[in-house]
Amino acid sequence: MRLIGAEILKLRRRRGMVVVCALLTVGAMAILFAVLAALHLADPGRAAAGTPGHFDDAIGVLSMTAAVVGVIIGATAGGADIEAGVFRDLAATGRSRIELLLVRVPGAWALLAPLLLAASAIPVAIATPDAGTVVGSVASVLAAGAVTSTVCVGLAALTGSRGIVIGIALAFQLGVSPLLAQIGALGDARLAIPQVAVSRLSDAAGLTAEMGLGVAIAILVAWSVAALAAGAWRTTTQEI
């Protein structure tokens, strides 16, 4: 617990990163619904901000920004000590290298989860959907952030660079992944894309209709475990 607390403190001290992540989550939702409310006031013929359609759109946007924030926080948690050259000092204390790697995951989640829950509270409070919709939607948002942060912790440990991981992960998340999901020739292989599995948690339509909930969870776990395993291998074999 002390190691996890230290990881949380290290991340919180990066105030610039925390502010950016808060703007991408809580700030984005506040701005979105403020704009929707203003448009409705200007033109009552437009749908009100709290309609189910706007709620679904907001959750879709938030899932995307949650993944982006997860990339930023996860890569920072996984690679900052290596880039700063202090990992050797941590390993010299006698702590297991695997333990030093794994505590970065709950450390990243502890910073990420409050931001995502606060951001999710905005569309939930305005649209007041039923309990089942709330659970599924919030679960998909949390999963999007948790998976990308976990994967990026492992990849940053593997590469020793948070910048490279952030660049590659954001390119895949925002560019490559949505394109792959639209390529019909890939068939069921598209179901292995993390974004598709995350959308299944909110019972979204489309590809996810072919995927069971258990399969979606298994895919997300598999991505996380594979990335952490790669990071663990590098962590235990690298010269310090």
Image (cartoon, rainbow, N blue to C red):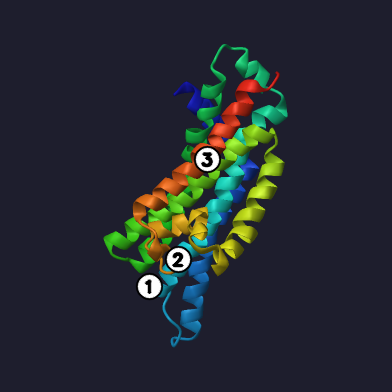
Q: Which residue in the protein does label 2 denote?
A: 207
Image position of 94 with respect to 45: above or below: above
Image quarter in which the N terminus is found: top left
- Mark 3 against mark 1, which lies toward the viewer? 3
**x, y percentage for residue 214?**
35, 50
Q: Which residue in the protein does label 1 denote?
A: 52
Tell me the SS state at disc 2: helix
Q: Is residue 27 left or right of residue 125?
A: right
Q: Amino acid at mark 2?
A: Leu
Alpha carbons under labels 1 and 2: distance apart: 21 Å
Which mark, by number, is residue 141? none
Asked if residue 31 shows in the view, the reply is yes
Of labels 1 and 2, earlier in sequence is: 1
Tell me the SS state at disc 1: helix
- Mark 3 against mark 2, which lies toward the viewer? 2
Q: Please, which residue is most extreme toward the left here?
A: 131
Callout 2 crowding tier (Cα within 10 Å): few <14, some 14–19, many ≥20: some
Alpha carbons under labels 3 and 2: distance apart: 24 Å
* Front position in the image: 22 or 89: 89
Q: Which residue in the protein does label 3 denote?
A: 150
Residue sitting at x 47%, y 42%: 222
Of labels 3 and 1, earlier in sequence is: 1
Q: Amino acid at mark 1?
A: Pro
**x, y percentage for residue 221?**
45, 43
